[in-house]
Amino acid sequence: MSSDDDHVYLSLAEGHGDDARWAFGTGFEDPLHGVDTTLPAGVEAEAHVALCLALADDALVAAQRLAQWITLAPELEEEVALANIGLDLLGQARLLYARAGQTEGAGRDEDALAYFRDPAEFRNVILAELPNGDFAHSMVKLLLLSTWRLAELTRLAEHPDPVLAAVARKGVSELTYHRDHAAQWAIRLGDGTEESARRMREALAELWPYRAELYAAAPETREEVEAVLAQVLDAARLEAPAETPVSMGRGRDGQHTEHLAELLAELQSVARADPEATW
Amino acid sequence: MVSSVTPIPTRLNAARSAAAAVRDPELPMLTLADLGVLREVRVDEDGVTAVLTPTYTGCPALAEMRADVATALRAAGFADGHVRVETQLSPAWSTDDITAEGRRKLAEAGIAPPGAAPKRAGGPVPLTLGPTRAAVVHCPHCGSADTEETSRFGATACKALRRCRACREPFEQVKEI
C-alpha cells in the first residue's frame, strides 16, 4: 500500500481527532450540533416528540428495507440509487430523532431512540416495515411512501418549529427525487413486458390498501397523494385496485407485524451486543 | 498566525481565509467556499465561529467538514476552546450556491456542473414524468451537448451519472437540488 493509501485510511479512522467519522457505528456527535434548538412557544412538547419520532421511525425503517436491496438489485445503478435514497432517509431520521430527544428532555439521543427501543415503541406505518418482496413490490412501496412523505413534508415545511421546518424543507428536495425514481420504474414495469406488468398488478393489489393507514396518520395528504398516484398509474397503463379493506395493525399506535421485530433485531443487534461501546 | 492580541478585523480575515480554503471531502477539487456550504465566519473577543450548512440531510461528509474547519482554524492560530463550528439548516443549501469558480473547477475535473435548481413555488410539488430537464448538460470531456442520463443517483448523494453520445465517455454531474 502506498503512503497515499495509508493516509486515506488513517483519515477515515482517526486522522482528525475524535469527532470526524463516517456513516457507520454509534456515538456520532449530535446531528443537531451547533443548531439553535429552542422550542418555540405554542409548540406542545409531548405532541412534538410524537410527531418527530413517527417521522423518524418511518424513515429509519424504510431506509433499512432499501439497504436490504444492496447486492440484490437488478443492476448496479439501481443499487446505488436505492442506497442513496436510503441514505437521505437515514439523514432525515437522525435529525428527527435528535429533535425528538431534545424536546423530550429525558436524555435520550439518536442512538437511544434508534437502537434501544423495542418494536412496540416504534411508531412507523406498517407499509414501511413490510418485507421487500420482488422488485415491483419494492417500487410500489417506494412510490406510495415517497409520494405520501413528500406531501407530508411539504406541509411541515411551514411548521412553527424552525428545526422541523428546516428538516422538512430539505427533505422535500430529496423526496422529489425519490418519488420520481419510483414513478419512472412504475411506468417502465407497468407499461413494460407482460411479466413486469403482471408483477406490478400483484404488488399494487397487495399494497394499495395500506394507503388507509397513511391517510389516517396524515389526513391532509390524501388529496395530493391520490392525484399523483392516479397520474402515475395512468402513465403506467395500470389500474387502481378495488378498495378492499384489509386487517392490519396500526403502526402509529405501536401495533406492528412480526416483520418489524425481525428487521429491528438485525438493525439493533450490534449496538445491543455491547451498549457501552462506541464504534 | 493570529493570536488573542491581533486586532479583530485581521483575525476575521485570517479566519475567513482558513475556513474558506478547506476542501470538500467528497469533491476535493472544491473548497467549502466554492461549494457554498460555508455560510459565515464570525470573530469576537471569545474566539471564532464558522457556520456550515449540509448539502444533503444524510451527507456523511458534514462531520468531516466540521472537523476539518475546526482543525484549519486552530492551525490559523485560534486557541482550542475558542473555535466553534455551527450548523445552519435554513435556508437549505442548493446547487445554486456553488460559485462560478466552483463550477469551473468541477468541469475541469470531469464533473459536469449543475444547471439551475428547480424553483419551488410552495404548495404541492408537481410530478413531472418523462424528460424533465430543459437545460442542456455538456460533456466535460469533449464539450458535446449530446449527453444522456444513465442514473439519477451516483457514487455520492450529490451526483448523477451521465454518458456522452458523441465521445462515448461516461461522466458524473452534480445534480440540481
Image (cartoon, rainbow, N blue to C red):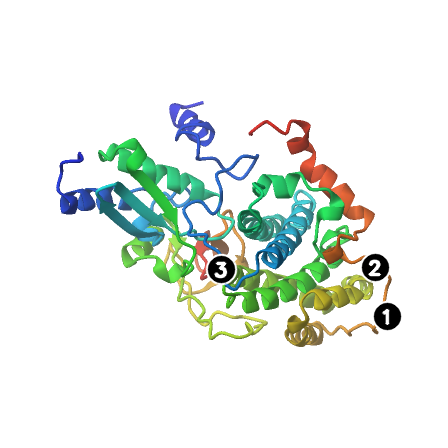
* Disc 1 and disc 3 in contact, CB within 8 angstroms: no
User: What is the spatial separation of the Cα atoms under label 3 and label 2, in whole angstroms?
Assistant: 32 Å
Cα gap from disc 1 to disc 3, whole angstroms: 35 Å
Earlier residue among tags 1 and 3: 3
SS at badge 2: loop
Q: N-terminal of the two: label 3 or label 2?
A: 3
Whether A43 is drawn above or below A27: the answer is below
How far apart in space, not on screen, are marks 2 and 1 (Cα)?
12 Å
Q: Which mark is residue A248?
A: 2
At mark 1, the secondary structure is loop
Q: Quadrant of residue A189?
A: bottom right
- Residue that badge 3 annotates: A170
Q: Which class describes the residues within 10 Å of circle 2: few (<14), some (14-19), or many (20+)?
A: some
Q: Which residue is mark 1?
A: A244
Which of label 3 and label 2 is nearer to you? 2
Residue at mark 1: chain = A
* Amino acid identity at mark 1: Thr
Q: Nearer the viewer, residue B165 or A270?
A: A270
Instruction: Name the amino acid, label 3.
Output: Lys
